[in-house]
Image (cartoon, helix red, strand yellow):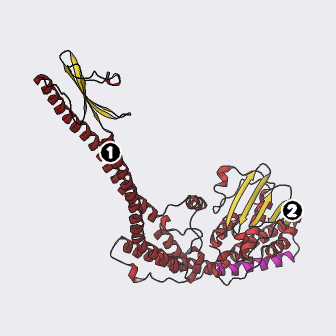
Amino acid sequence: MTNLSGRSRENLQLSAAQEERISPSSAVQSGSPYEAQGGLSQASPQAHDQQRELHQKPPRGLSQRIMLALTVLLTGLAALYSAAMVGVIGYTEEELISSFLEDDMDYVVSQIERGDTAIGLPHADVYGDAPGLKPVPAQFQDCPFGFTEITEAPAVFVWRRAWQGGSLMIVRDQEGFEEKEQELFILMLAVLLVVFLVGAAAGKRLAVQVMRPVEKLAAAVRAASSQNTWKPLPKELITRDEVGNLAAELSASMHRLFKALKREKAFTGDVSHELRTPLTVIETSVELLKLTELTAAQQRQVDKIERSSKMMHELVEGFLAFARLSENAGSDRVSDVLQAVGRLWIPEAAKAGRQLVFRQEDCCPGSFSPLLLSTVVSNLVKNALAYSHEGEIKVTETSTGIVVADHGDPIPPAEQKRIFEPFVRGKASADIEQTRFGLGLSIVWRICMRMGWQVNLASGPDGNAFTVTLVSPADAAEPVRRSDELG
């Protein structure tokens, strides 16, 4: 092959320097607005799966956490205050009432010692073993000496004292006190509820005020990322606070990202153009060689060269498609693309003694890039032809995309995790050509991530099935739109 031009070498150096400068944490997320405007995602299939699992988890917004935190804080403080009030009321009740009853008991004892005929208290009942007093009622016989509170009806306070081999007892009704205590408890619960509602309202208002700059920043980033060229974020977002620092970092990161994607796109296009010239020379030379008389061994070598040059040509065309991709790219229905792929690959499958079947289970809505979609299907069909030994290969159009199924050997789970990585080849049998580069499935994965599609592998004893989801089940019922306009 010929050497690369000066411009391509320069772009190659720039691309290598770019990979050294950009850390994995700044790699483009698959399906993001940045990636949709140019360049291939640098994230691995495993990283993309982790990101998808993260996005599938039910999110809890920052504003919700702020509101919840303030509500819990205020309600917790109110609950602690209420609990303290209950403790204070209980302590005050026991200490104060017991002190009053002890003083009343001293007064009763003084009456008995003076020999008063009318012994008693205006606000309580007095019982005991002294002359002129009623005996202790049966329900109070078990009360200990000192202060006792009985909450069961009738609710009373009891003070009992030993006296001359017997005992004296004062019983004071506490129904009025209990009613006031219940009213106080109800009031505290009402205050707790009011504090909860006020905390929720205040938390919501605070969350709105705190999140407003963040939402403005998010809207500005979405608007900037949807452009084909980089534009700095509005100056009013670069404030002297944490959100302003974040806005400045995002603006600088997007600038670096757009420049990197621009260099990558230019490099891909330049290298692809440079490779087309030597490939054309190789293909022309093969055609000329086929016109001469060749031995069987020479013919096999020429056929191998021809197949390899065709594979390289497909790779170059795929790279050029990425470099030229834009919103104005042509689009076809899935059925039209599959018909075109069938015309190309059904004869090739027949030469290999295999049956390639295209069928339509349902109609997939939308229009798609014929070049990119045909590249995806062709690589999956080529992979099935290479790694399955017998049985037919089915390419099925569904309501959400395409399924390519074969009867090949099951793929081990450890190998499934790496099957979409570049230069990873399956454990092929000895009859599989060693000219394959292990790029087919990697190109499929990168195109799918580039276009917002999904590709998944299901492997089992009956064979392997690659499912390419072009539209979500929810979008399948919506009006027809181009897939690269979804999301």
Q: Residues within 10 Å of mark 1 (few under 14, many from 20)?
A: some
In the picture, measured across the screen, residue 311 lies left or right of residue 37, that is right
Highlighted magenta segment, given as a residue range: 271-294
Question: In percent of the image, x 12 and y 27: which residue is there?
Answer: 110
Which secondary structure lies at badge 2? loop
Q: Taking the image as drawn, is residue 434 in sight?
A: no
What x and y, as percent, mark residue 423? 65, 62
In the picture, measured across the screen, residue 29 lies left or right of residue 71, that is right
From this viewpoint, which residue is outermost toward the front? 117
Which secondary structure lies at badge 1? helix
- Marking on residue 181: 1
Disc 2 marks a residue whose amino acid type is Ala
In the picture, residue 111 is in which quadrant? top left
Q: Earlier in the sequence, mark 2 or mark 1?
A: 1
**Residue position marked by numbered label 2 in the rendering:** 352
Q: Are marks 2 and 1 in contact (CB under 8 Å)?
A: no
Question: In percent of the image, x 84 and y 73: which residue is there?
Answer: 339
Q: Quadrant of the N terminus?
A: bottom right
Q: Taking the image as drawn, is residue 197 in sight?
A: yes
What x and y, as percent, mark residue 270? 61, 81
